[in-house]
Amino acid sequence: MTKKVYTVTDLGPGDGGKGGVVHKISTMMRAHTIVKVGGAQGSHGVCTSRGERFAFGQWGCGTFEGTRTHLSPRMVISPEGLLNEADALRYKHGIHNAFDLLTVDERALCATPYHGIASRLKELARGNNPRGTIGTGVGETYRDLCRLPEMAIRAGDISRPDIRNRLVSVREQQKRDLAAIIRGEFLPGDREEADMEISRLYDDGYLDFILNRFQELSLQVKIVDPDYLGREILSRDGVVVVESSHGVLTDHFHGFHPHTSALRTLPCFTHAMLKDAGYDGQVVNIGVTRAYHIRHGAGPMPTDDPAMLENLLPGSHKPADRYQGQVRVGPLDLVMLRYAIEVCGGPTAFDGLAVTWFDQIQTNGAWHFSNRYSGADDSTYFSSSGEILVRRGADNDQLEYQEALGKQLLGCTPEITTVNIPLDAGRDELFSLCAGALQEKVNVPVRMVSFGPTERDKICK
């Protein structure tokens, strides 16, 4: 047997269906470990053929199969979230040994509840001009690392005797950072929520609760040294799956500022992690997209079509909330998909695509997609054929460019093509239809098409 790593990358703004794809790969290939990168705010849904349903945040999406999870140094963890998820796995699904299946790199950043408070208060303060956030504080944690590295709490710190003092330092810094927001105005409908968040920030009893949770986690979780990934996981024969949160279109420097993550979401960072760990085996890179476009919250989405909500969302969407915003859907945006692929290095960066939720297209009997925009005329941002140009950079100039690009996209109108789907077509015929259309349009072969929620509904070729 040889070593093989599958990387799974969402080629949209998130919500692409990574959970089911990771579960299928880990089941089909009998993966021994799932390595997580990104942030603890992910919600990756899994539905097994045995009837289990769960939205995984920090455990990998192969957990129901007994696959181990490793939270990598490129993961921002939530100690509170880990305890809550372990309880849910134990009491709802009978997995009594969830922590026995988990290791955490000592370098993984810890998002504290105070970072979550900061994230939510900042979003409430934006009023009717939302940026969009999950609200767990993952982004705030990473931004604080960049400006105040000495205050960062990492997984290796949670058992330190001075952890209370470190939590106090984080809280006091958030008080200083949020002072102007706390004194400011909120929308009338947000005032009660804002007051509750502010009271927690100043509540010593809440501090004691957080401290107790950190200490409880330190007694249950296995924290490992930086060499563990290479020494104990990647050196083993068999399959590893790298499961990432977020999507390429929310990458900090290549998404559409300010509607992005603080984190980097491109697969090149996963490749660098594997290289740093000394991995020399095969890597198979899979990009994930729904068969239609979806975006949860604010941000450019040229194919947004409210009239399609009822046809596309039944059973497949997460509820809207004040922080993440309203979920939007529309025809599959091939211009945006090609941009995401190009940002990652072009079609050769991927060995295949996994297309999810094609069963919804089958049910509707029609597949709508956009292969070009009208209004994509500015040569600073678009090619002569109307493709979105990729600008490379990692500085404020890049953020300004990406924000301007987002505004350009708001002025674009998609040209929609519709393909009728035969109602009596079998899965093999539909796979060929989907694969043929996308191969031609994005130049990446389709390797998986999902026709339903479980691993048995996902066809691989």
Image (cartoon, rainbow, N blue to C red):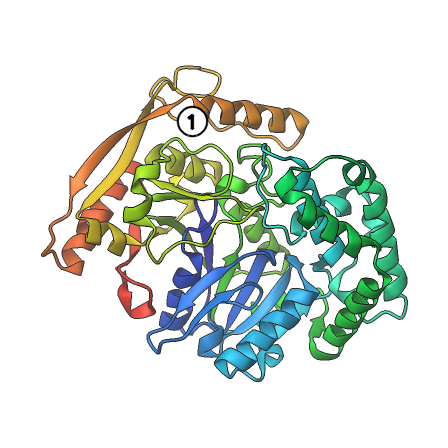
Q: Is residue 291 visible?
A: no
Q: Is residue 417 left or right of residue 291?
A: left
Residue 420 picture quarter? top left
The answer to which of 115 and 100 lies nearer the viewer is: 115
Quadrant location of the N terminus in the rendered image: bottom left
The answer to which of 172 and 306 lies nearer the viewer is: 306
Q: Secondary structure at mark 1?
A: loop
Residue at the spot of label 1:
388
Picture coordinates of residue 38 (x, y %)?
Answer: 59, 54
Picture coordinates of residue 46 (x, y %)?
Answer: 42, 66
Name the kind of residue labelled 1 in the image.
Ile
Count residues near mark 1 (Cα–Cα under 10 Å), then give few for <14, some for 14-19, many for 20+. many
Residue 449 picture quarter? bottom left
Farthest front residue in view: 188
Q: Is residue 44 above or below residue 29?
A: above
Task: Give the residue displayed 44% in from the left and 38% down from the top.
Answer: 340
